[in-house]
Amino acid sequence: MNKKRRMFIRMIAASLVRRRSRMVVALLAIIVGATILAGLGMIYYDVPRQMSAQFRSYGANIIFMPSEGTFISDDAIRSAISVIPSSELEGYTPYRYENTSIHNIPVTLAGIDFTSVQKTSPYWHIEGEYPSSDGEVLLGAKVALSLGVKTGDKISALNSFEVTDNMDVSTVPEYEMYEDPATGDVYCDHQLDLTVTGIVETGGSEEEYAYISLNDIEYLTLVKRGYDIVEVSVASTSDNLSQYVTKINSDGQLSAKLIKRVTASETEVLTKLQSLVFIVTAVVLILTMICVATTMTAVIAERRREIGLRKALGADNSSIVGEFMSEGIVLGGIGGILGAVLGYVFAQLVSINVFGSGITFRPLLIPITIVVSVIVTGAACLIPIRNAVNVDPALVLKGE
Amino acid sequence: MSSLLELKNVSKIYGDLHALDNVSLTVDKGEWIAIMGPSGSGKSTMMNIISCMDKPTSGQVIFDGDDITKYSRRKLTEFHRDKIGLVFQQFHLINYLTAVENVMVAQYYHSMPDEKEALEALERVGLKDRAKHLPSQLSGGEQQRVCIARALINSPELILADEPTGNLDEANENIVLDIFRQLHKEGTSLIVVTHDPEVGEVAQRIIRLEHGRIASKK
Ligand SMILES: Nc1ncnc2c1ncn2[C@@H]1O[C@H](COP(=O)(O)OP(=O)(O)O)[C@@H](O)[C@H]1O
Ligand SMILES: [Mg+2]
């Protein structure tokens, strides 16, 4: 059996290598198809992420900023929000930022309420889940990348500060505090253990923060204070929105600003774009199949005499089908591998030109491209091979 | 001597053309027969029917006691594999395989490819040093010898050659005839179609076809 298999491989290798000028045409067709399949596949999966990057302002349309040198207090938020009719208010999220370090890498923590952020930032693309309790953290994709952590991992945030009189240190473990003998000042290396529940991808600056609960940020700093910014989501006309902003600003407790919000119908367009990519991929696959089938028909027609000869030497139909199919499958595999690589390059180019940012590499698409390429090539070979196998060896071998 | 092959009232009719017209013929085991006749007289048709590549319109072809015209496709494949060796005027080598690989293809479908045996077969036809050449790198005579090596590699009972020297010069023709003589001496039956009297002469018997009928047996 072994010698037979070796001869089988030898024949197929000889056919592919020594007839390569013929095979190149078929291979090119397969590569083009596989490239487009892999490329559009990556774009297809990336559209939702790119979409949120493009429409990051969907959601919040007013932001509150503190008046100079202060923070935004709960009272200020309450009185500003009271300007907006409650029927129009979709939600608001106060943000409190603190600089800390995680595993010796400086990271800005943002304290937020995870229920309200889903109202004001519905475009966030979460891998995993939002934190549901204290001690959990949602990492921006860039932070997760630089820390090298993934969902489920445990990390600890470290905040070093000088302990002042107004701090309540009752919750701080003894060993985290130390005294400078020279000055008598007390310092604290305060640590907070966190579990990563999810990673947020937006394509924007949101990816550069780590999000924890407001309780946790207060615990880590031992400081109660107001917020740095508040995002507000209001469903109203732009005229009304301007009125609200003017009114809030005139109160003077904080400064409100309108930001541009994209309507929901525009995101629908992008969902439709995704279906379009899907349809184009399907059409390209069918075209590739037709193209490969046509090329293979020509390639196999040239070899009718060879098929007749093999039959005259005692080959049965199934072994001829097997030999020719194997050639097709090898071609499909080679085309698939090259196509997957080129497809990634293609998707990168499209993404950079259309969306202005790189594509997320999806490793799974490589085996999928190769398998689909092999199946499509195999299917495309099937019909011409079946026809050729039915040739009458006498007619094929007869003179001329 | 027992008969290897028997054609009984074999006819092949294309439309109203009788390519073979009620032909009967017996070939004994180990016999060397030449089939001669003008172009269009039905020689190739007869060879195709004997080699089972074509079915007769009527009549029987008995090989080793079996009517091969009634064979199923599977039996036919076995027959091609095990019983006969074919030599073609156009050689019909696979152009992307080397000489030795072309011989091994016949082994591959017959039983087990064996490069050493294939090289021995090439040595028999004087082509050992050409084993790694592609057909395009071989002369016509050399290609025909590869074709013969391929036909004899599985030691068939019967070698069928349709105009084997039709494309060869005299020197190569003699080499081929020498190989046939050797095979004949070893007991292989040969049926050789030719229009060349010299090639016909070396056979034991000459069957002359005219308009699809046997005009004379000698
Ligand atoms: N497939 C076919 N269809 C129609 N006529 C055929 C076919 N094959 C052979 N013939 C005819 O049968 C006759 C005998 O052909 P052939 O056996 O090839 O002659 P030869 O080999 O003696 O030159 C010729 O007239 C030829 O035209
Ligand atoms: Mg002829």
Image (cartoon, rainbow, N blue to C red):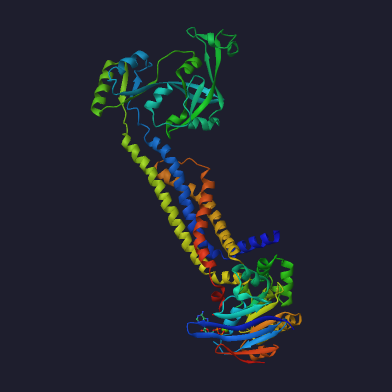
The residue drawn where x is 52% and y is 47% is A368
Quarter of the image for residue B146 reads bottom right
Residue A12 in the image: x percent, y percent? 61, 62
Quarter of the image for residue A11 reads bottom right
Residue B74 in the image: x percent, y percent? 61, 67
Looking at the image, residue B196 sits to the left or right of residue B30; the answer is left
The residue drawn where x is 70% and y is 72% is B153
How many circles with numbers are drawn on the protein? 0
Ligand 2 quadrant assignment: bottom right
Toward the right, the furthest residue is: B186
User: For the C terminus of chain A, which image quadrant?
Assistant: bottom right
Looking at the image, residue A180 sits to the left or right of residue A33; the answer is right
Report if residue A109 is visible in the image: yes
Residue A371 in the image: x percent, y percent? 53, 50
Residue B175 in the image: x percent, y percent? 70, 83
Vertical arrangement, residue A353 with respect to residue A27, above or below: above
Looking at the image, residue A250 sits to the left or right of residue B141; the answer is left
User: For the N terminus of chain A, which image quadrant?
Assistant: bottom right
Vertical arrangement, residue B200 with respect to residue A235, above or below: below
The residue closer to the viewer here, B64 or A187, is B64
The residue drawn where x is 63% and y is 82% is B7
The residue closer to the viewer here, B111 or A259, is B111
Report if residue A399 is visible in the image: no
